[in-house]
Every structure is written in C-alpha cells, then in structure tokens.
Image (cartoon, grey):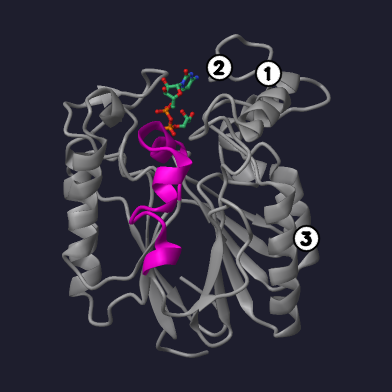
Amino acid sequence: MSEEPLFTFGVIADIQYADLDDGMNFARTRKRFYRNSLQLLRNARESWCGSAVQPEFVLQLGDVIDGFNSQHDASRSALDAVLSEFRSSSLEVHHVWGNHEFYNFSRQELLSSELNSSLHVHRRLREPRPGGDVYAYSFSPYPGFCFVVLDAYDVSLLGLERESEQYQRALSLIQKHNPHEDLNSPPCPTASDRFVGRFTKFNGGFSQEQLDWLDALLSCADDKQEKVTIVSHLPVHPDSTDPVCLSWNYSALLQLLHTHPSVVLFMAGHDHDGGYHWDRPSGVHHLTVEGVIETPPDSDAFGTVCVYRDRWS
Ligand SMILES: Nc1ccn([C@@H]2O[C@H](COP(=O)(O)OP(=O)(O)OC[C@H](O)CO)[C@@H](O)[C@H]2O)c(=O)n1
C-alpha cells in the first residue's frame, strides 16, 4: 500500500453567502448562518493553503451565494466577496452550479462569468465538451484520473426566460409529476414512484445531450482504465440523500454509472445534512457533502480528499 497520496483536492458545498443576519431554512428546522459562511470559506482556504502539500484543486459543489442576495440587489457584491476569498490564494477552483446560482443570475450571465470554470481553468481540461449552453466539462489532474463537472440544471425552470422552448419543455415535464400550484412544494410519494418528491423547481435534470456526452467520455475512460470522479450539485443515489434533493432523472445517471467501471466516486451538495452510500453493484461511492450555510460558527464544513493509487481517504 502506498504511503503518500498521489494528490489531494479540497471540497466545499453550499456556502450560500449573503451579508444578512442568521435565518432559518424553509422548514424552520435548521439555522442558516448567511454572514458567517464567508468565514467558514476563509477557514477552509487557510487550511488548504497551510497544508504541507497544497491541494491540486478545489471543488466548489454549488450554491456559492444565497438566492436572497437577488432580493437585496446584492448578487454581484456577494459573488465578489466569495470569489475574492478564493482568489486570495493560488488554488485552482472548479465551480459547480446549483439552484441558488440561478436565483441570482441567468444561465447566459453564468456562462460568461467567473463561475464558468471551463473558461478560466485551462490547465488539464479535456475535449470534447457538450454543445450548446450545457455547463459540463472534464479534466485530468493526474495521469490515470479524470474528474467530470456536470450541469444538474440543464433541464430546469431556472435561469431561463419563461418564453424559451427549454423552459416550456421543463415545465411540461415537472407538471406531469408535481400537481401543486407552487412547484417548489414537493409532491407526495406514490406507489409507482417513492421519490417523486424530487420534482420541484429547486431541482433539475440532465439533458439527453449531456448524458450522451458523459456516456462517450466514460467509454473512453473505461478503455484507458482511468478512475473517474463525477461532481454535480444534485445527488443521484436515493440512499445518499434526502430523496427530495435528487436530480429529476437520477435513474438515467445511475444507469450510466452501472455500465462504466471507470467511475469510482460521485460527489454532490444540495442536501445540507450530507449523506453517503456505497452502491455495491456498481462499486461507486456516493458522497453528499454537508453544507457550509447550516454549519454553526464554531465548527467547519469542508473536506480534503487524499487520493492514493488504491484508495482515497
Ligand atoms: N419545501 C420547500 C422548500 C423550498 N422552497 C423554496 O425553494 C427555494 C429554495 O429553497 P432552499 O431551501 O433555499 O434551497 P436549498 O438549495 O438551500 O436547499 C434545498 C432544499 O430546500 C432541501 O430540502 C426557496 O425560495 C424556498 O423558499 C419552497 O418553497 N418549499
């Protein structure tokens, strides 16, 4: 067994920064520490930068600022605050997009922003990329290892003009499953779909185009016997999360993971309680990372993953 890791990387999820007093989540069960989340990001950055061997990169798993910023006309200033924190180090950051990105910015704005890491992180990026406005890409930080950033909202009601074809298609899809007038309100489980509660407006799905691109990418990785980690804001395994946080078409993604032996790890955010499940049939570890926003000020919420040839910890 090798002693030194081949490389390390940082993970952080659901920072949801806003210059606002503490509040509660929608269900009023958990406190949200909007202002302190920036301090917890700082703690994470200091830990990564202070470690003997700096992480090769950091995965920011989405919801970097909270949707409330939009109501206070503070989207840009809040984003500047978190990006300045990341920029104050030489860490290479890969940003994943979550629902709160779309409460603050349109898809077009995000595509041309610093949150589009594929524009800013040129080192080690791989081609091809999916076409159109899909925000997905892959990179190889170390020979034999590949990381894939997925767009969990390329089929969704978020970040789009209501008149657009994509919005109308997503609306038809969600309305087939969610009878509520308020589409953020989860439908009740049924005998035919225990996890139908995922069909809410704060979730989304993967387009067929993105799934086809991922399928081709994973076939190449299988051939090269690479180890692949996939990241997305939304989890895809029902046992790794509160099912209300699942991607609309989580099962299509799971099916792909079952056919590609190269995939070893799927990481997500969104469910602030976090979760973990090892999917025995595919061998894939599903890790949902706890959210910064609901982590009390005297604690921390970030991870440093050490990758070895034969394991990670
Ligand atoms: N039952 C619900 C839950 C939420 N909403 C509204 O949806 C928007 C997003 O909610 P928020 O809790 O901020 O989203 P997160 O991404 O932080 O967490 C995901 C899920 O909530 C986890 O369960 C916001 O406008 C809420 O008010 C709702 O209407 N009904």
Q: How far across and how far down the image is residue 74, in percent?
A: 21, 33
> Which SS class for mark 1?
loop
Q: Which amino acid type corresponds to the residue marked 2 in the rendered image?
A: Ser
On screen, residue 219 above or below 253: below
Gap between marks 2 and 3 measured at Cα: 31 Å
Residue 310 highlighted magenta (yes or no): no
Residue 11 located left or right of residue 281: left
Q: Residue at x 55, y 12 (%)?
A: 182
- Any part of residue 279 in sight: yes
Asked if marks 2 and 1 touch (Cβ < 8 Å), the reply is yes
Quarter holding residue 164: top right
**Can I make out residue 148 in this image?**
no
Q: Quadrant of residue 93?
A: bottom left
Q: Determine the CA span between mark 2 and mark 1.
A: 8 Å
Q: Which residues are magenta?
A: 97-120
Residue kind at label 1, given as amino acid type? Asn
The residue drawn where x is 45% and y is 65% is 118
**Residue at numbered disc 2:** 185
Ligand 1 is found in the corner quadrant, namely top left
Question: In x, y percent, where is residue 256?
Answer: 76, 58
Question: How far across and how far down the image is residue 126, in percent?
Answer: 55, 76
Q: Does the magenta run of residues contain 115?
A: yes
**Residue pointed to by mark 3:** 258
Element type at mark 3: helix
Of 13 and 194, the residue lying toward us: 13
Q: Residues within 10 Å of mark 3 (few under 14, many from 20)?
A: some
Q: Earlier in the sequence, mark 2 or mark 3?
A: 2
On whether ligand 1 comes within 8 Å of the CB at mark 2, the answer is yes
